[in-house]
Image: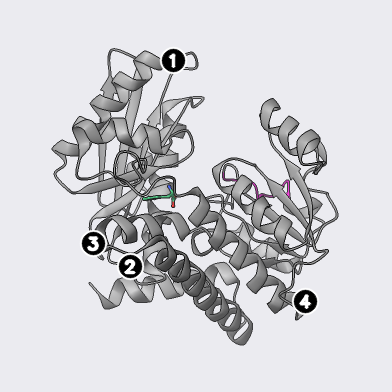
């Protein structure tokens, strides 16, 4: 655990052990150069606490870059609540309240919102003790609601921009698109893809969701063991990270990777292998900025939902266009191009 923190380039890690549930809470504040650290709260069981901490450290760095690329005045942070497998709803709600108390104690060092395993309803609970540092409460509670639809809109835009760059045609009519994970982001992405006339393949691990998308919507389900080798135009990872690795990259049968998941590469050098295979990669934190841009915009800057949507589309389009051009012109990976832009913005404001 000490090594993980020592080898990380961020500012602070706040650690709490929650005795009543046996949960561990890690809040990683990667950078406050551009503003207060902001990032979602990920709540799920982990195989061990090193994995949980590592997830917080890496995800918070992603948040720094996510805000830096479009020049939003926020820093990068992330909370990971590593919970026991069989936690009951009552214990979970009480834990969320204690977590809100911790966010409150930090006094604005860290602002949060939903992430994998938490919802707008959970933000209502967290904000009982954590206000005003909690984004994305439900609309009934006076918040802007779930970030998923805005993130999905950004992913949809990114897929169009990538297709335009790769195929010379932004239209998604009859494009074969594989969506991995049909939760809050992937599910909303599918709505856009359906209206754009795409041919959709999907994968998920949740039986109920699989049933809905396969039986009710009639989409093609791809089982986990056939996922990476599926022949398609665009692979859109919208579940957990680490999906682009030494094992999966050689199997890929797509032209473009553009999806909403955070931290898609298992290791930094995987970006190079993906590019060597001739696959166009739209950097994750550029593609999935939608929720993190829209909700603070709506709740803290007074944007209307309509303005938030326009801003998400505009900034994803602009940033990706710049990244694809820069990568091609100087012969670097798109991942490296995104990083250069982020770092340039972080330097300029420091
Ligand atoms: N957790 C999401 C992300 O990684 C969205 C989010 C972050 C929403 C911060 C609001 C605030 O981008």
Would you call the spot at circle 3 few (<14 residues within 10 Å), some (14-19), or many (20 or more)? some
Label 3 residue SS? loop
The numbered disc on residue 66 is: none
- Residue at 75 percent across and 81 percent down: it is 168
Which residue in the rendered view is the most extreme toward the right? Answer: 231
Q: Is residue 45 above or below residue 66?
A: above
Query: Residues under labels 2 and 3: Cα distance?
Result: 8 Å
Q: Does residue 16 appear in the picture of this structure? A: no
Label 1 residue SS? loop
For the residues bearing labels 2 and 3, Cβ distance under 8 angstroms = yes
Q: At which x and y percent is residue 108?
A: 17, 48
* N-term mark: 4 or 1: 1
**Image-quadrant location for residue 28:** top left
Write the start and end of the magenta stretch as one range: 241-248
Circle 1 residue? 87
* N-term mark: 4 or 2: 2
Majority SS type along the magenta span: loop
Would you call the spot at circle 4 few (<14 residues within 10 Å), some (14-19), or many (20 or more)? few
Q: Is residue 278 above or below residue 153?
A: below
Query: Ligand 1 closer than 8 Å to the CB at disc 2?
Result: no
Question: Is residue 161 shown left or right of residue 296?
Answer: right
Comparing 259 with 189, the one in front is 189
The numbered disc on residue 72 is: 2
Circle 3 residue? 35
Comparing 32 with 104, the one in front is 104
Would you call the spot at circle 2 few (<14 residues within 10 Å), some (14-19), or many (20 or more)? some
- Residue at 31 percent across and 70 percent down: it is 346
The numbered disc on residue 167 is: 4
**Image-quadrant location for residue 157:** bottom right
Question: Is residue 317 shown left or right of residue 87?
Answer: right
Would you call the spot at circle 1 few (<14 residues within 10 Å), some (14-19), or many (20 or more)? few
């Amino acid at each position: 655990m000490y090594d993980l923190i020592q080898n990380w380039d961020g500012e602070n890690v706040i650690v709490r052990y929650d005795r009543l549930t046996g949960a561990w809470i890690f809040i990683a504040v990667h950078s406050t150069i551009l503003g207060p650290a902001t990032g979602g709260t990920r709540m799920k069981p982990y195989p061990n606490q090193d994995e949980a901490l590592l997830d917080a450290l890496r995800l918070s760095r992603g948040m720094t870059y996510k805000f830096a690329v479009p020049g939003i005045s926020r820093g990068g942070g992330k909370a990971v609540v590593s919970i026991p497998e069989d936690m009951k709803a009552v214990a979970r709600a009480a834990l969320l309240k204690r977590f809100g108390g911790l966010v409150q104690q930090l006094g604005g060092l860290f602002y949060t919102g939903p992430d994998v395993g938490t919802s707008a309803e959970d933000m209502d609970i967290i904000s009982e003790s954590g206000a005003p540092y909690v984004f994305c409460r439900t609309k009934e509670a006076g918040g802007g609601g779930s970030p998923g639809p805005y993130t999905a809109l950004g992913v949809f835009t990114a897929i169009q921009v990538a297709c335009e760059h790769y195929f010379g045609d932004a239209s998604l009519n009859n494009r074969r698109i594989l969506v991995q994970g049909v939760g809050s982001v992937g599910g909303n992405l599918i709505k856009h893809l359906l209206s754009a006339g795409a041919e959709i393949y999907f994968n998920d691990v949740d039986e109920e969701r699989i049933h809905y998308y396969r039986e009710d919507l009639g989409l093609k389900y791809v089982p986990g063991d056939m996922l990476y080798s599926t022949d398609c135009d665009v692979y859109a990872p919208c579940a957990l990270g680490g999906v682009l690795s030494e094992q999966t990259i050689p199997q890929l049968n797509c032209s473009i990777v553009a999806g909403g998941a955070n931290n898609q590469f298992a290791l930094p050098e995987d970006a190079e292998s993906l590019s060597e295979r001739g696959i166009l990669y739209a950097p994750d934190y550029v593609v999935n900025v939608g929720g993190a841009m829209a909700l603070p915009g709506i709740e803290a800057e007074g944007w209307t939902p309509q303005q938030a949507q326009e801003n998400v589309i505009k900034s994803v389009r602009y940033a990706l266009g710049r990244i694809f051009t820069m990568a091609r012109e100087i012969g670097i990976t798109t991942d490296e191009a995104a990083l250069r832009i982020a770092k340039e913005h972080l330097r300029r404001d420091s």
